[in-house]
Amino acid sequence: VLGLAGCSGPGAGTNPYQGLTTEEISAATVQLQPPDKTLLVEELDQLVALLQELVIYEEDSSYTEYAGQAVTVQLTMSDGTQTSVTEYNPFLIIDGVGYRTEYEPCEALNRYANGLLDSEDAVVVLEQPPVLTVVSDETALTALLGTYSWQRKNADGSVTSVEADSPHPLDCKELLSPPLETAEATAALRFTEEPDEIVSVQCWHDSHWSDTSAAGEDVAYSGTAIDLRSGGYVYEIVARWDSDSGYGGTARYSFYITAEQDP
């Protein structure tokens, strides 16, 4: 995190959330970038106390010239309206408008968000299946998201279920090309949020493009590392995330790799 000293504009600052109460909020999330994760806030008292202490001065849009970690608090109010405040010291960005801010209250909000991230009880908000990046031989490729069954929690506590279908990986040649080329015998699966289980890994030789009746071959894997076949293969990963928190489900991902391994 880049620490930047806050600076005050002329005149006294204002506390935009000084009168905020927990009763006015029906739901709250905190997003941290990096690592680009959104967390559900289940206990509002501490968050509201920190928001009450925030101080803003004059408008300032120069926050786009800074680099560092941004913490965005998204509030859904009891009347259904939404508002967001982003801590980006020495700025606060409220509903898209940037302001100079007082350093210490901003830093306290940042520490709170990172503490929430480090908590064993943190509930990660997964509105849809996480992104999968495949890495081999220092080369990365974003996998194609396929069929998935997902659920996500709404602000009122209800759950929305989504069933999304997609073509067979062998019908996705244009979307999966060009392949990731590697001389390695393995590839690493890097999800933006690690799954609770890799359900299965299969592959098809690239001579089977468009032949969706071709049987897939099981691929060996350990943790989030998979073995690669020599030559060109289309791989499909099935992964599962527990939905106890209200977010989760099962998703399929596919990618195309050509591995030229030494004999």
Image: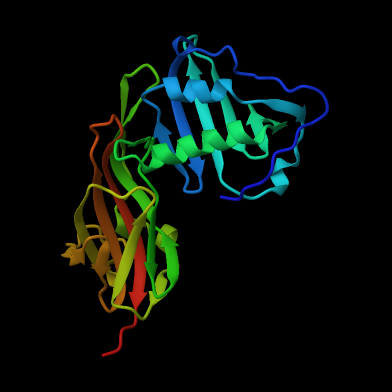
**Up/down of 115 relative to 53, above or below:** below
Q: Which residue is found at the position 56% from the left and 46% from the top?
A: 69
Residue at the right extreme of this rendering: 10
Residue 182 lies, in percent from the top left, at 38, 77
Residue at 74% x, 27% y: name it: 57
For the C terminus, the image quarter is bottom left
Coloured how? rainbow
Name the side, left or right, on which 39 lies relative to 197.
Answer: right
Residue 167 locus on image (x, y percent): 32, 49
Task: Pick whichever, 44 or 240, lies toward us.
Answer: 44
| Residue 33 vs residue 204, the one in the foreground | 33
Picture residue at 75% right of the left edge, 41% below the top: 62
Q: Position of residue 177 (x, y in %)?
A: 43, 65
Q: Is residue 155 left or right of residue 70?
A: left
User: In the image, 100: left or right of 168?
Assistant: right
In this view, the residue farthest toward the bottom is: 263
Q: Is residue 3 visible?
A: yes
From what the image shows, is residue 213 above or below residue 5?
A: below
Q: Is residue 206 among what the camera can see?
A: no
Residue 100, quarter of picture: top right
Spot the residue most to the front.
Answer: 104
Q: Give whichever of 186, 90 is nearer the camera.
A: 90
